[in-house]
Image: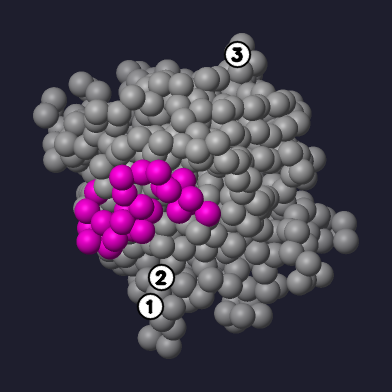
Amino acid sequence: MKIKLIVAALAFSAVTGCVSSTAPKSAAVQPAASAKAIEAHMQFLASDELAGRETGSKEHEIASLYIATQLQALGLLPAGENGSYFQRVPLRKARLAQDSARFTLHVDGKDTELSYPKAFFTGPSMQYPQTDVTAPLVFAGYGLVSKEFALDDYAGLDVKGKIVVLLAGRPDSLPSEEAAHLNSLKTKLAAERGAVGIITIHTPKQEKTRPYATSLLYLNAPSMEWLQADGTPADSYPDLKAGAYVHPDAAASLFTKAEHSLADIFTQLENKQNPVGFELGVTASLSRRSTHEQISSPNVIAMLLGSDPVLKDEYVVITAHSDHIGLANDLRTDDKINNGAMDNAAGVSILLETARLFAALPQAPKRSILFVVVTGEEKGLLGADYFANNPTKPIDKLVANVNLDMPVLLYPFADMVAFGANHSSLGKVVERAAAKEGIALSPDPMPEQAIFTRSDHYTLVKKGVPAVFLMTGFKSLDPAQDGGKIWGSFFAKHYHKPSDDIPSLIKDYGAIRYDAGAVFANINYNIALDIANTEQRPYWLKQSFFNGVFGKPYNRESAN
């Protein structure tokens, strides 16, 4: 099996050797991406020997070393910690003791225990080895607060020392990306108001998009969080000790003493109404045991130093995640390795080829280019969030982020989607770069999915950095191939499954379109080159929600 790794390494050496010998650095020669180089990178990163690149695993360490040495071979400078190409991310890995989860409802002196995991499930505590909480329950709708949308689900409610009961998801009336951002704040909002626990109710709408039973497949999966300098988990709230996710059939019992039943609440949701909160008049006890392990996993960071005396101290950030989900627990298949060929060996390979294009320039662009390959994306954007909170370059000098996550290279795409393009001046930049390759820029085909908030770039967005997340569009240059159907088929059949590997994808779709990957790399390169050489740094558009929430004086449209 090790022969595969040697062959992949030799193939890449042959490709890069050929490129360097036949493409001399000349101002008259525009560098172009190599499909063969992308293929070689993907063969290594998606190989069985890397065992799915699980965060914290030896195999992910090998993948990170490969990425770092490829960037080093291009002559890029180390931009990690202590003069290295690495930024070690300290992590806490937590597991729930499956026999310890308890949920007891107290109504008029009668105790009813909910069954685990049929009626409810929970994850491990990132803070404590043992948690036991008994408190009154308060229903608080979706648990959202927003001045911009005149929302306050906590209005008139006292939740201090109580467990809040919230609906999963967010109102249909809100724009999807903005709603997704607000949804991510639920835990913070509850903690700030003094709650000691959160119970989330699975809704009929959630059942249609992600069945309750699907979540049960991940009961044994560990949770992770990056650790702050004092050793405490980031984004943690010590007083918020209890948590449970409840099936709607079981959740109905929480409303037996309330002024409205859960059926009434669901009817309101069907009628597009936002439920108002109220006391439930019952108490619950929640307990669990958790085990903790401290590990670390690397981000890889390299830099091409800019040529302008002033602008070289500003950085265009190109990101991709190197981790995947490791080994599968699915007993229905003998193949246990989640290779992650498209997610995200493809994105990393395109990043590496983008780096080669920049290294081939006879003169560097004005701004510096920072290549950041992060860990822990599949665990909750952990490596990216750690970098955003502990940047190796000043955060106010990071002018833009272009993120590469799961480009589906299974058809010759005719259009590209840039999630977030409608929020900043980067939309025009992407449109120009794509046009150079004859590729159109299409609007988000899945706005309800709020994809802009769901990958690594979003951690930098929250720090005020304008960003776009690039994806192959649904149109195909080949009239015999329906790009949208192929993309949907991949997502349904191969996403986060062992079949996201090169042999399986070739079997199902006839080929991996490494040539499409080269087009993607060319576009990515031209986006970054445009940003790097344009005097005006990218800015948030006035009408963007994110301009008001995250924009800084130096990157708002109103400041220009």
Which amino acid type corresponds to the residue marked 3 in the rendered image? Answer: Ala
Label 1: how many Cα within 10 Å (few below 14, some 14–19, many 20+): some
Segment tinted magenta in the rendering: 250-274
Q: Specify few, some or many for label 2: CA neighbours under 10 Å numbering under 14, 14-19, or 20 or more.
A: many
Could you say whether the residue bearing mark 1 is in a helix, strand or loop? loop
Confirm whether residue 262 shows in the render: yes
Q: Which residue is mark 2?
A: 413
Residue drawn where x is 24% and y is 30% of the image: 155
**Mark in the foreground, 3 or 2:** 3
Q: Is residue 511 above or below residue 109?
A: below
Mark-to-mark CA distance, 2 and 1: 6 Å
Q: Give coordinates of residue 526: x percent, y percent.
A: 36, 49
- Identify the residue at image location x=39%, y=39%: 280
Instruction: Specify the amino acid type for callout 1.
Output: Leu
| Circle 3 residue | 229
Where is 12 relative to 397, above or below?
A: below
Let me know if residue 143 is in the magenta part: no
The quarter of the picture where the C terminus appears is top left
List the residue tagged with mark 1.
Answer: 477
